[in-house]
Image: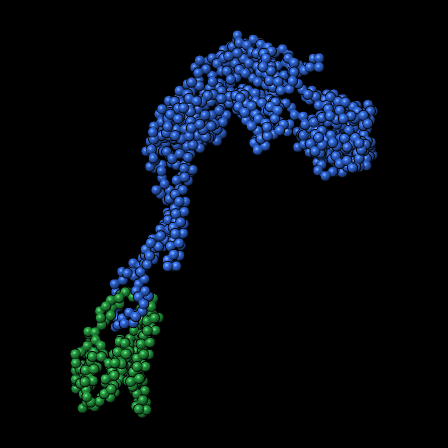
Amino acid sequence: MRSTAWASLVGSAWPSPQVVPSRRSVLARRAFSLKPGRPGNLKGPLHKLAEHFGRRGVLVIVSDFYDDPEAILDAVSPLRFRGQDLIAFHILDPTELEFGFSDAQPFEDLESGEQMPVVPEAFREEYRSLVRAHIDALTRSFAGVRVDYTMLDTSKPLDHALYKYLGSRSKMMRIR
Amino acid sequence: MSFLAPLFFAALAGLAIPVLLHLTQREKKQIIRFPSLMFVRRIPYQSVRRRKIQNWLLLMVRMAALALIVLAFTRPLLNRADVPAGGASAREVVILVDTSYSMGYADRWARAQAAARDQISKINASDRGSVVLFGSGADIQMRSTSERSRLQATVDSAAPSPSATRFSPALKVAGSILAESTLPKREVVIISDFQRNGWRGEEGAKLPEGTTLTPVAIQDSVDKPNLSVTGVTFTRSSFSDQQRIVVTAGITNRTEQKVSGGSMTLEVGGLMVGTKPVAVEAGSSASVVFDPFTVSGRNTRASVRLSEDALAADNTFNFVVSPIEPVHITVVDRGNASSALYLTRVLSIGNAPKFETVFRQPDAVSDEDLRRSAVVVLNDIEVGDPLAKRLARYVEQGGGMFVATGPRARWPQDVDTLPATVGQPVDRTRGDAARVGGLEYGHPVFEPFRAPRSGDFSAIPVYGYRNLTAAMGAQVLARFDAGTPAVLERHVGRGRVLLWGSTLDVSWSDLPTKPVFLPFIHQSIRHLAGYAEPQPWLTVGQVFNTSAVAARGNANQRVVLTPSGRRLPLDDEGTDVLELTEQGFYEVRGDANQADAIVAANVDPAEADLTPMDPNEIRAAAVGGDPESAGTPSAVPLTPDAREKNQRLWWYLMVLGIVLLGLDTVLSNRMAKA
């Protein structure tokens, strides 16, 4: 990242984007100080971001994308329409992928706070198939609007995943 | 309530497992914080949520069924004795009343009834009482009731019977009543004159543990005069072709005072034919000899009676007399006196029965001879075809035939009547003579020779015999030493044929000169004639075989007329034996309503011996322990029978559990279809 560049941090629950200097130390400090909080959605912040940034830039979306693929696509479409280069990092924990719980116990939705008694063994396979279908749908949707989409498993080293992503992006850039 | 197999309750834990799992999962409080339950919400509700019980009714039915079955396996036991219906003092009282004929002595019976009423009056509303009348057997007249009026009525209507005293059956009946009782206290009261003759030891008469036995002795302090007739004997004689009988009656005086001034009468056919004075010293016996009387016909009723005394039942002795009917025999021989010498001598001996013999040559045998004869003896003759066929018919119609096969014996081969085919003579004059062995001692002919030194056939030399080959259906009763049959029997129609393989004179054997010859011939003739010793009387309690009478009349029409006038029908499906329960004359009547047989029944003379015993002897044998402690009733544990009765609850539980499982199946099927 060049020193003259500006970077913005956008939280899905924030009322407006926060623009910070592009110095890496500042950006990193602000990024690491972020904490998950209230429930939010992608559509509102990204639409505001599209209005806010008239210039073309690189927009990195880091999200668990717990939303309908069509809604996500609807959220990113204005940015993509304005020519922004979008990179989507889909961050998922292995438990979110595999749902490897054994005991029946209450589950709490971190966004809504809703609690639900769940017997994991009873529907693990069904959950996995839904997650796979969701990832596939996101992959297809982002590919359709030329958004670089990468699913990152938090159990795997981040540098490996980024290296892999960057390698594929450089190839794509040559094609583009 | 207790349980015989409480370990089965562990199986109930199996029922709790699903419920416990359910409760365990429900109680888990740790909450998983998950980024989003978006996908969880999309999964259908049933597979996401903890499965809830859909049908409480079905669950309850299943659990109840399994619980009942488990409960049945634990064998629940109702300890009714612990909490009796009538309280802890309720009694099961069995009153045994002696009705043997000795209770008719003086006023014993009235006192026995009074004692029984007294015992019944002590029965409370919570108690139950039974009345058992006993003599040689025991009958439950009223069983386990609290209604004193019914018990009283039973005692009032009872009367002494002609039977003898036996305590053992009565105690066994009482034991069976007490064994089925659930009341905590059990008592047996014996009201009897406690004759020594009625108790022969323990005899396995053991009452349930804890039973109280109370003897009530009905005995007399004053010795009243009493004579009893112990039996009669006959002396027969002939006068002007008529049989005369002299009756001698035995009398016993068991009291301690001389009895005199009385008399004894003899009644024959309902008419008094003689009276004799009677005088018997104390504790001694005497006999009374009556004048001879002529026996006019078969089955004549006769009785000897003593004058009245303190005990009436033993004053009369009944019997049946008949003229001894001879067994008619036709001996068919060659007319040679020497060949029939020994046979003639043997048949001329004997009075029971007397043998009336006629001798005929083969061609002189008439139909009248065969009709009159019970037995035909063929003494080494050649039988032609016509006579053989007549004899075959005679045997088939019930006649008996004895065949002696010497050197002249011939029988047509086409008449299948003899028990053996008569083969060639076997000459044993050279070398050792033949011997007879292998006797069938179980057969009536040889049964008298069963005992040691009662006749040895093997010592008799036989110098010649015919080689006999047994016919189909014939039984070999004796064999010669070479193995060939010596004596055979065959049933032909309703008659029998006996065949002896040698002669009845001394030409071929020494048998006629040996002591066994007479009993051998007499037994053979008796057996062939179907002769049986008539029984002048039986004792009450014995049984009479009516099947012997049945053969003569129409079985479906026969009845037995008892001394009290009751008519007991006999039929093919009825029993052949009749138990004599009354003193007097029983008549077996055929379809013509005429007496085919008369049976005299007398009381057991031993019962007339009133010598008492110590009742504690019975109490010690029946309830054990010393008599003093036996007088204090105490609560007793249930007998095995009663315990088993109280355990029957498991059966109902099991049935109910199975019914519930069936209901569960029906409910499940209906829900599945719905």
Q: Is residue A42 left or right of residue B60?
A: left
Indicate the quadrant containing the N terminus of chain B: top left, top right, bottom left or bottom right: top left
Label total for image:
0
Of B270 and B359, nearer the camera is B270
Q: Report which quarter residue B374 is drawn in.
A: top right
Q: Where residue B128 appears, x then y in whole percent?
A: 37, 30
Residue B481 in sight in this render: no
Of B348 and B410, nearer the camera is B410
Q: Is residue B342 left or right of residue A139?
A: right
Q: Is residue B354 left or right of residue B558?
A: right
Q: Is residue A87 above or below residue B379?
A: below
Q: Report which quarter residue A25 is drawn in.
A: bottom left
Q: Is residue B269 left or right of residue B472?
A: left
Q: Name the residue rendered at 78%, 32% in the picture.
A: B388
Residue B163 in sight in this render: yes
Q: Is residue B316 above or below residue A69?
A: above
Q: Where residue B77 appears, x then y in whole percent?
A: 37, 42
Q: Where residue B559 appears, x then y in whole percent?
A: 57, 26
Question: What's the colour of chain B in the image?
Answer: blue
Q: Where residue B75 appears, x then y in whole percent?
A: 39, 45
Indicate the quadrant containing the C terminus of chain B: top left, top right, bottom left or bottom right: bottom left
Give the letter of the green chain: A
Q: Name the residue rendered at 31%, 89% in the picture.
A: A172
Q: Name the residue rendered at 39%, 52% in the picture.
A: B663
